[in-house]
C-alpha cells in the first residue's frame, strides 16, 4: 500500500449517531477511499459471506455491544468465514464504550483483531490507528 489510506473500510454499529460520526471523521481525515456503514451485524456478515475475499474491506470498525449479534459473536462467525476462505487480509478494530476487561480479552483472542479503542472515536485516535495499521500492512 503506497499511502496511509485504506481502500475499503466498514463500520458495523447499531447506533446511527456513532455510524454518522465515525464515517464523517473518516471522511475528514481521508482515512479510506470508501467507507461503508452497516447498522446490522447480520447484514454485514451476509455481505462477507457472499463477497469474494478481494472484495472484503481492509478494515472493519466493529461495535462490541449490539443486539441480536454482539461483537464477539460477529468475530466468531468471521473467523469461521476466514477459515473457509483461506487467508483474507481483513482486520478488525473493536470500538466500544465498554470498559469490561473480559470484553477486551475476548476480542484480543482473535488474531485478526488489530486494536481495541473506546468510544467516542476521535481524530487523534483515528490518525494513530491509520499510522500504526498502515505501517504493518
Image (tube, grey):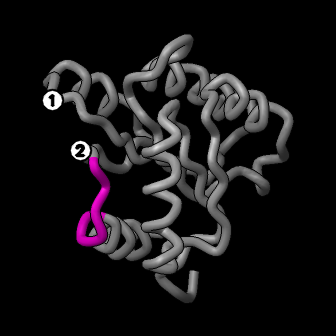
Location of residue 38 in the rendering, given as x and y in whole percent from the top left corner: 64, 40
Image coords of residue 41 (percent x, y): 61, 28
Residue under circle 2?
118
Q: Residue at point 22% right, 26% down?
A: 105
Instruction: State whether residue 123 is above or below residue 30.
Output: above
Circles 1 and 2: CB atoms closer than 8 Å: yes
Distance in Å between CA atoms under marks 1 and 2: 8 Å
Q: Image check: 49 left or right of 108?
A: right
In this orientation, which residue lies closer to the viewer: 33 or 55? 33
Residue 124 counted in the magenta span = yes
Give percent across and percent down for residue 37. 63, 48
**How many residues crowd mark 2 within 10 Å: few (<14), some (14–19), many (20+)?**
some
Q: Say the numbered circle drawn on residue 16.
A: none
User: Could you tell me which residue is drawn at 54 percent across and 47 percent down?
Assistant: 11
Q: Foreground: 75 or 119?
A: 119
- In primary-sequence order, the first of circles 1 and 2 is 1
* Residue shown at the point (78%, 54%) measured from the top left: 55
Residue shown at the point (23%, 44%) measured from the top left: 118
Residue 129 falls inside the magenta stretch? no
Q: Which residues are magenta?
A: 120-125
Q: Reply above or below: 56 against 125.
A: above
Residue for badge 1: 99
Amino acid at each position: 500500500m503506497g499511502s496511509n489510506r485504506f481502500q475499503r473500510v466498514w463500520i458495523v454499529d447499531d447506533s446511527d449517531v456513532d455510524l454518522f460520526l465515525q464515517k464523517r471523521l473518516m471522511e475528514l481525515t481521508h482515512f479510506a477511499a470508501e467507507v461503508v456503514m452497516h447498522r446490522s451485524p447480520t447484514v454485514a456478515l451476509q455481505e462477507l459471506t457472499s463477497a469474494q475475499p478481494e472484495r472484503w474491506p481492509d478494515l472493519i470498525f466493529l461495535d462490541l455491544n449490539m443486539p441480536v449479534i454482539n461483537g464477539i459473536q460477529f468475530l466468531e462467525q468471521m473467523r469461521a468465514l476466514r477459515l473457509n476462505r483461506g487467508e483474507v487480509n481483513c482486520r478488525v478494530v473493536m470500538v466500544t464504550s465498554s470498559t469490561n476487561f473480559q470484553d477486551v480479552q475476548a476480542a484480543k483472542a482473535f488474531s485478526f483483531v488489530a486494536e481495541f479503542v473506546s468510544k467516542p472515536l476521535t481524530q487523534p485516535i483515528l490518525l494513530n490507528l491509520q499510522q500504526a495499521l498502515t505501517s504493518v500492512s
